[in-house]
């Protein structure tokens, strides 16, 4: 067997590590261990000269294992693996010890921090001994795409992909395309017609030869993996059709909050209390009147209904503030003499043209009254015969500190938005996760906002969280670009650090199938053993730790590797000694 | 008890001066920078807010606008150019009309024509009274010192009687309005109970504030305090000597320069001219925030007081130099300006602040010294 030659590189990370860890001391100490051929410290290992150092050592000294002791592997593991590859070494013969996030940044005692750094590097040293070369695998990509949801986000994604000449299946549950946007009259902040813009998009979708539209259609089941998905749909709830595609865009949107659960607002109990969506309908019809046909003299618009409130939803629904200002402006134009009240908690007018709309509204004689979200909600009650209005809204006005009553003949509740009831079903079908509020979770909240943890599945629009039209479209086009990228490559690289079942040891208990969060494990009925679909597997290791017989091995995290790593970590006072492979 | 918001109030207050009602976003910089605001009497933001929301009762029961001397620091530091200082000025006009039970104050403030015509009618009455009804002929005989016999041309008895009639009319109007102010701001405020002892104890401060105007001196720019103080003392002294002590002040005998009549007269004239010139030039040049906006009532006040002072000086000069006709005519003009000015300005317009300001300080001190009453519903 080939002799193990390890190179150890301790990074300063400028002063990030060096100020709390004596990196020279660590390198010196680790250099004494058997099999360690070279131990260096350097200012920035991730820099080009830092990587060159490793590459040169591999070539000159014939290293066959590398340990870099620096930052989190989430940041630079790939960087160093590539360096190894460049030097002709298998990239998996590498291990990283995190002495920044897990050491220098969180400790204040330099001596102790240095000791911990040595322990972490020793652990990595023990583990890397047992690393095995692994080879990356790729799968072919089916160039068709499935888009779930025919709202503005779904249609935008479909148009973008189809525009590049690729096939798109657009599946919509409802009878027609358009989603939430079809229910809007004008859009904020420019007060342009939503319908005009939407009809243009719908017409383009219907005309596009590359888009196959299935309305009134639900998806029965989706299976497969990135590049090779398949689903069964039943258009118009009739015969089942099977579709094949390589990527999925989830654009299922959201629904509005039901305000009847808020006792203070008496929605459903008093006649002229409307949700914002009901009021949109009134605007579209062009007649703003009470149930009895008279136009209102006092209109109150209450913000944050079901949003930003611990009892309902804690998050901000994002579009309601600007929608409320839009209403106030439309009301002012329609009813020049009416008293218009905006009862708000905080005015969130971020983005282009929004603060301007706010200023414009206040100049149009609209009264803004603030209530405290932490305090009691405003209360709507029926007015007396002498009050000269239908309802009275009582609240503690925050800016004046006074208890006030607001006259109203019509109340508009700016209902928040929430995840759809069927979000869980969709999440399960495509294998993605949901946050506490049942919105779908992106792969990375900052750096990867449209991808999900399941390769080939992308989330766009408000199924990912409350969003306005331009943001939904931006996301849709971003996802389309990602998908077109993978289609152009023709294949994608899939995870190699996957789980593997030793069929000799598997007892067929199916524990692993229950715990797998990616539905990557299936059961082979004839052999009565579990089987891992390596394309779906993310290598999370859950099955490996749950397996009672030790039949499941996770590549790159084998039992032997981990036990040895722990031993390395714990053996602080024992003489340096490494086992031979 | 919750108050009804009222969108129409803004439109109503707008008639008292041009405001920037919607600009304020309630950052509170104005209140933070104000050297006069204090716990319990926070302004200008809170008054601004009450105005925006149309809380009539809050405004009517608030003393805050009178506690402001308009140094303009709030408007300078306002990030939205909402002019909180000018808003307080407008609210003072509005409050003057709220206290006034005759309704004339509102008419004068909100309609130029009402004010002009009222002044004109009074001026014509004065001209008729002194020029035509007055039975005494123009008296060409001079005194031993060679000055005009003014009291012979305009019998001092009748003038004094008229003076007293005017003073009683004006005082009763002003006092009744102050009582209304007291009722609205102190009595109707159920959150505090003021003892009789407090009324007596705090009274001396009313006098002190009236004489010294010391709250004004807390503002950053002390120059305005000085010119305002000269104007106020000059006006008060002149008002006292020509209305209350006329027979002592205006006699056949021309006093020597060191005698109190002459000294008081000269001081008052100097005080008035100095104060008026600072205010007039300031307003023309729009110098500083304080003088940036001028309502018609501000100008009318300055112009009429200036004319009164100038005609008064002329009467004095003509008289001691024995110029009979000139004295006669300038005296009638003097009266035709002075009387309308006093009747219009003192109870109904800008001059009323001479009373409302020190009384507001007095009422505020009463409220501060009073026993707080626990509200039945506290949230």
Image (spheres, coloured by chain):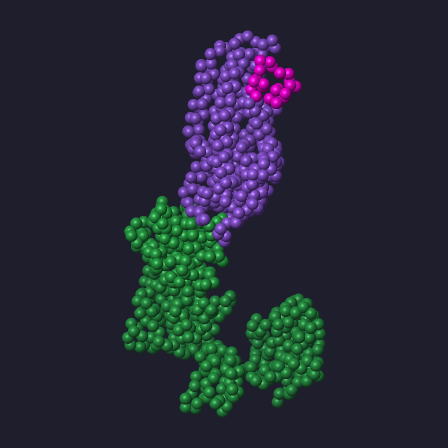
Chain colours: A green, B purple
Question: Seen from this angle, which residue lies furthest front?
Answer: B196
Residue A348 in view, yes or no? no
Q: Is residue A164 left or right of residue B326?
A: left
Q: Is residue A100 left or right of residue A323?
A: right
Residue A40 lies, in percent from the top left, at 68, 75
Residue A151 lies, in percent from the top left, at 37, 64
Which quarter of the figure has residue A281?
bottom left
Can you say which quadrant of the picture contains the C terminus of chain A?
bottom right
Residue A394 is a magenta residue:
no
Above or below, A502 against A264 in this view is below
Which quarter of the figure has residue A99?
bottom right
Residue A580 in view, yes or no? yes
Q: How many marks?
A: 0
Above or below, A497 against A464 in this view is below
**Which of B302 and A387 lies nearest the eye of the viewer?**
A387
Q: Which residue is rendered at x = 49% and y = 20% of the image? A: B162
Q: Is residue A297 left or right of residue B360?
A: left
Q: Which residue is rendered at x = 37% and y = 68% of the image? A: A149
Residue stretch in magenta: B245-265
**Which of A11 and B333 lies nearest the eye of the viewer?**
B333
Question: Seen from this angle, which residue lies furthest top?
Answer: B141
Residue B256 is a magenta residue:
yes
Q: Which residue is rendered at x = 51% and y = 12% of the image? A: B153
Residue B121 lies, in percent from the top left, at 43, 23
Residue B193 lies, in percent from the top left, at 53, 43
Q: Which residue is rendered at x = 41% and y = 45% of the image? A: B7
Can you say which quadrant of the picture contains the N terminus of chain A?
bottom right
């Amino acid at each position: 067997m080939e002799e193990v030659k390890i190179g150890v590189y301790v990074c300063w990370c400028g002063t990030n590590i060096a100020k709390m860890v004596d990196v020279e001391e660590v390198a010196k100490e680790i250099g004494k261990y058997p099999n360690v051929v070279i131990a260096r410290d350097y200012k920035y290992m991730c820099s080009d000269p830092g990587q060159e150092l490793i590459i040169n050592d591999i070539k000159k000294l014939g290293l066959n294992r590398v340990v870099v002791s620096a930052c989190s592997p989430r940041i630079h593991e790939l960087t160093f693996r590539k360096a190894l590859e460049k030097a002709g070494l298998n990239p998996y013969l590498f291990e990283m010890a995190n002495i920044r996030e897990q050491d220098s940044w969180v400790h204040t005692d330099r001596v102790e921090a240095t000791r911990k750094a040595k322990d972490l590097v020793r652990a990595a040293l023990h583990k890397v001994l047992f690393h095995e070369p692994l080879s990356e695998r790729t799968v072919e990509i089916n160039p068709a795409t499935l888009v779930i949801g025919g709202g503005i986000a779904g249609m935008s994604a479909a148009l973008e992909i189809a525009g590049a000449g690729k096939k798109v299946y657009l599946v919509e549950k409802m009878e027609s395309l358009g989603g939430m946007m079809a229910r809007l009259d004008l859009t904020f902040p420019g007060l342009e017609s939503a319908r005009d813009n939407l009809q243009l998009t719908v017409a383009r979708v219907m005309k596009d030869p590359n888009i196959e539209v299935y309305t009134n259609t639900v998806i029965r089941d989706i299976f497969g993996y990135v590049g090779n998905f398949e689903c069964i749909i039943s258009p118009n709830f009739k015969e089942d059709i099977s579709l094949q595609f390589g990527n999925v865009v989830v654009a299922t949107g959201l629904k509005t909050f039901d305000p009847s659960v808020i006792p203070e607002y008496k929605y459903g109990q008093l006649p002229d209390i409307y949700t914002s969506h009901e009021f949109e309908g009134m605007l579209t019809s062009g007649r703003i009147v009470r149930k009895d046909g008279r136009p209102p003299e006092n209109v109150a618009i209450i913000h944050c209904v079901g949003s930003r409130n611990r009892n309902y939803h804690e998050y901000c629904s994002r579009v309601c503030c600007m929608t409320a200002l839009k209403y106030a402006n439309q009301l002012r134009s329609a009813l020049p003499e009416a008293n218009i009240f905006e009862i708000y908690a905080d005015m969130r007018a971020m983005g282009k043209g929004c603060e301007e709309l706010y200023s414009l509204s206040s100049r149009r004689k609209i009264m803004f009254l603030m209530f405290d979200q932490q305090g009691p909600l405003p209360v709507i009650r029926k007015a007396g015969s002498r009050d000269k209005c239908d309802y009275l809204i009582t609240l503690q006005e925050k800016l004046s500190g006074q208890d006030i009553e607001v006259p109203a003949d019509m109340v508009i509740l700016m209902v928040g938005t929430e995840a759809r009831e069927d979000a869980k079903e969709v999440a399960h079908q495509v294998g993605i996760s949901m946050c506490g509020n049942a919105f779908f979770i992106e792969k990375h909240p900052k750096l990867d906002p449209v991808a999900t943890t399941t390769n080939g599945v992308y989330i766009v629009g408000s199924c990912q969280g409350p969003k306005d039209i331009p943001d939904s479209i931006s996301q849709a086009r971003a996802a389309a670009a990602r998908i077109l990228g993978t289609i152009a490559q023709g294949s994608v690289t899939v995870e190699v650090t996957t789980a593997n079942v030793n069929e000799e040891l598997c007892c067929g208990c199916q524990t692993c199938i229950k715990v797998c969060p990616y539905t990557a494990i299936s059961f082979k009925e004839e052999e009565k053993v579990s089987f891992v679909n390596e394309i779906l597997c993310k290598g999370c290791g859950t099955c490996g730790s749950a397996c009672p017989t030790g039949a499941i091995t996770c590549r790159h995290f084998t039992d032997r590797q981990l036990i040895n790593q722990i031993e390395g970590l714990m053996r602080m006072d024992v003489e340096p000694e490494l086992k031979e492979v | 008890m919750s108050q009804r918001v009222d969108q129409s109030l803004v439109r109503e207050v707008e008639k008292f001066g041009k405001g920037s009602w919607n600009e304020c976003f309630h950052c509170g910089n104005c209140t933070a920078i104000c050297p006069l605001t204090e716990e319990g009497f926070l302004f200008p933001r809170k008054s601004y807010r009450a105005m925006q929301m149309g809380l009539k009762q809050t405004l009517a029961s608030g003393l805050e606008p009178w506690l402001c001397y308009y140094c303009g620091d709030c408007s300078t530091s306002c990030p939205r150019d909402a002019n909180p200082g000018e808003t307080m000025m407008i609210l003072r006009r509005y409050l003057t009309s709220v206290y006034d039970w005759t309704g004339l104050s509102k008419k004068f403030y909100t309609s130029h024509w009402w004010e002009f015509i009222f002044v004109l009618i009074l001026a014509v009455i004065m001209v008729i009274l002194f020029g035509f009804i007055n039975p005494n002929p123009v008296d060409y005989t001079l005194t031993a010192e060679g000055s005009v016999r003014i009291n012979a041309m305009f019998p001092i008895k009748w003038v004094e009687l008229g003076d007293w009639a005017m003073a009683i009319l004006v005082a009763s109007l002003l006092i009744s309005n102050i009582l209304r102010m007291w009722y609205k701001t102190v009595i109707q405020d159920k959150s505090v109970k003021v003892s009789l002892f407090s009324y007596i104890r705090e009274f001396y401060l009313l006098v002190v504030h009236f004489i010294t105007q010391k709250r004004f001196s807390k503002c950053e720019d002390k120059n305005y305090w000085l010119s305002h103080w000269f104007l106020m003392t000059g006006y008060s002294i002149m008002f006292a000597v020509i209305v209350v002590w006329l027979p002592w002040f205006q006699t056949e005998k021309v006093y020597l320069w060191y005698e109190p009549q002459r000294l008081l007269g000269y001081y008052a004239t100097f005080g008035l001219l100095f104060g008026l010139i600072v205010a007039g030039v300031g307003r023309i040049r729009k110098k500083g925030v304080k003088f940036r906006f001028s309502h018609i009532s501000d100008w009318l006040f300055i112009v009429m007081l200036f004319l009164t002072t100038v005609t008064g000086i002329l009467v004095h000069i003509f008289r001691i130099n024995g110029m009979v006709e000139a004295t006669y005519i300038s005296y009638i003009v003097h009266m035709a300006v002075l009387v309308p000015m006093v009747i219009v300005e003192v109870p109904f317009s800008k001059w009323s602040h001479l009373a409302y300001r020190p009384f507001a300080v007095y009422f505020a001190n009463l409220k501060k010294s009073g026993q707080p009453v626990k509200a039945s519903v506290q949230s």
